[in-house]
Amino acid sequence: MHKENRENFIEQMDSGSVAIFVSAPAAMRNHDTEHIYNPDPNFYYLTGFEEPESICVIAPDHPKHQYILFVLPKDEKAEIWNGKRVGVKDACAHYGADKAFPIDKFDEKLGRYLEGAERLYYTLGSDSHIDVKILDRFRRGVKSRIRTGKGIHTLIDPSPILSEMRLIKNETELNRIKKATDITVDGHIAAMVAAQPGMYEYELEAIVDATFRSGGANSTAFPTIVASGGNATTLHYTTNDCRIEDDTLVLIDAGAEYKRYCGDVTRTFPVNGTFTDAQREIYQLVLDAQYAIIDTIRPGVSIDEPHQKSIELLTEGMLSLGLLKGKTKKLIKKEKYRQFYMYRVGHMIGLDVHDVNCVRDAEGEFKTFEPGMVITIEPGLYVAEGTKKVPTDYLGIGVRIEDDILVTESGCEVLTDAVPKEIDAIEELMKK
């Protein structure tokens, strides 16, 4: 997969170009402890390499080495503490590099691959330490061009090319996403079955995350959200430390990450297994909207269409519940719906949970859906406690229903529909 990705990228490079990609630097959690490492998504997309302090150089015009890796060398003492390294030799044997060097040889060896190049693809901000080196090379290239007529004269951000490429998933990517969503489904069902009044949010978080890991996920795709009662009206609530009171809803937004690809599902359910009348009214409205929004997704339809559909349906729903008053079109024009529905209805998903979002063309118009795209659809309504001039029964209710959708040749496929979301199905599952 990564070899094909590199070949596709090379086809889109300008002639006389070299590209440099840097894996993300390790991030410190505290004094001497690092966060769990995640490579830069574009770097990983092109290489499959997962170690920090590594650089990829793509030099299509070099006579021998078109794909070069700079990596941490084998080091027995360091590996005692932090685990085995791939090393220089296996960077070629297992990752397909034409040539590999120790990372400390980057300055020394880079020049040979820049000879004759006029354009350099590099994303500034990837690594401040490497940024300095690249900008120095660029300045030297500009000066050389004045004197000799040769040298780098243009610095190009490769992100737009890769964002376009990553928008359409290939077969390997789709298999990983489907595995991630299958594991995600299991985590949500486990939490719904275990939920009881009096539990703490973090207990359900632990069940979700443990189910992910036991199912083969390498991590969560993002910090798991378990929001009960009024906490569910905070969109990215992650404190997860409240006791879950009887008669309240629990909103769980969680996704597993499998081989760097993400799932992302939200379900909202009553902790005691039975919806109250007010909870049922808001929940059913959101569910009906989600079904109708998903029905709009098929090749050739504007990527903006699901969001516009969500605004229309949810605004009408807010009127029917008495959350808003007025005429639908006027309320939409003035964006009054944003008091209870504040975001776009979905996002692309892939190597990032909010994956590269190259959804507009050069003129700013929305592109259309194509087979191989994967998007979330997650309408919601959020009535914060203390909101004035709304029916009091709805105060503190937050509902979001989210699924992962694959665009197919003939329409779309809901990858996560095995998690119950019909009211009767949720109540039946929780009775068991």
Image (cartoon, rainbow, N blue to C red):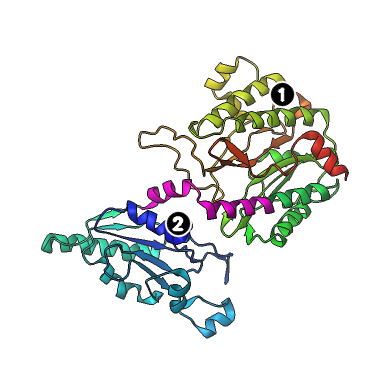
SS of the residue at dot 1?
loop
Q: Could you say where residue 362 lies in the image, as x and y percent from the top left? A: 35, 37
| Kind of residue sitting beneath label 2 | Asn
The mark lying in front, picked from 2 and 1, is 2
* 175 falls in the magenta region: yes
| Kind of residue sitting beneath label 1 | Val
Task: Tell me which secondary structure the magenta stretch mostly adopts.
Answer: helix
Q: Which class describes the residues within 10 Å of circle 2: few (<14), some (14-19), or many (20+)?
A: many
Residue under the image location 67 percent in, 61 percent down: 216
Residue 195 sits above or below residue 344 on the image: below
State the residue position of label 2.
Answer: 42
Residue under the image location 58 percent in, 82 percent down: 80
Q: Which residues are magenta?
A: 158-183
The reply to whether residue 160 is visible in this rendering is: yes
Which labelled disc corresponds to residue 399?
Answer: none
Residue under the image location 78 percent in, 51 percent down: 190
Q: What whole-number distance in Å separates the C-alpha atoms at marks 2 and 1?
A: 46 Å
State the residue position of label 1.
Answer: 390
Q: Is residue 352 left or right of residue 399?
A: left
Label whose residue precedes the other's in the sequence (2 or 1) = 2
